[in-house]
Image (spheres, rainbow, N blue to C red):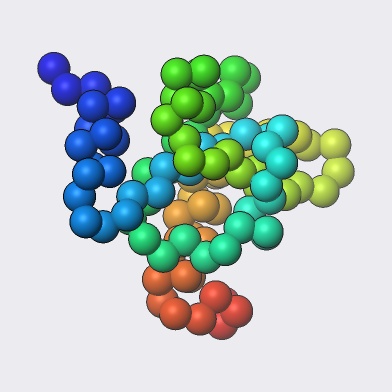
Amino acid sequence: MQTLTDWISRMRRKPEELSVIGTDSGAEISLNDQPPILRPVVLLIGNEARGLSVSLRTLADKMIKIPMIGKVDSLNAACAASILMFEIYKASMGNVDEF
């Protein structure tokens, strides 16, 4: 049985650069400070209570956080994934400021 680690290792050997991005509310890099994601990407989304496991964190090229205002420090995993996928979609359309 192929694991996620095996699959990512195999995909990284292909000519297209694969970016593996993990999310964490305590990450130093904010989504707002992240350049547009224009290449093939794997998003690693943790659950609301425990976040990403250590083994998944080691697979990530970088960890980013979704900026939030107020006392909230984490999002539902589906909401976080939706925000990130929308940002990737905007970048793929060529004009990130158009939306």
Residue lying at 20% horizontally and 37% vertically, measured from the top left: 10
Q: Nearer the viewer, residue 47 or 95?
A: 95
Residue 74, image quadrant: top right
Q: Compared to 53, does 11 lie above or below?
A: below
Residue 70, image quadrant: top right
Residue lying at 63% horizontally and 54% vertically, measured from the top left: 31
**Quadrant showing the C terminus:** bottom right
Query: Residue 63: percent from the left, percent from the top?
Result: 58, 39
Residue lying at 47% horizontally and 26% vertically, measured from the top left: 58
**Quadrant showing the N terminus:** top left
Task: Answer left or right for 88 relative to 2.
Answer: right
The answer to whether residue 34 is visible is yes
Task: Answer left or right for 69 relative to 67.
Answer: right
The answer to whether residue 78 is visible is no
Q: Compared to 50, does 14 lie above or below?
A: below
Task: Answer left or right for 8 relative to 64.
Answer: left
Residue lying at 51% horizontally and 37% vertically, measured from the top left: 22
Q: Nearer the viewer, residue 94 or 75?
A: 94
Q: Nearer the viewer, residue 35 or 81?
A: 35
Query: Residue 32: percent from the left, percent from the top?
Result: 67, 59
Query: Residue 89: percent from the left, percent from the top?
Result: 43, 65
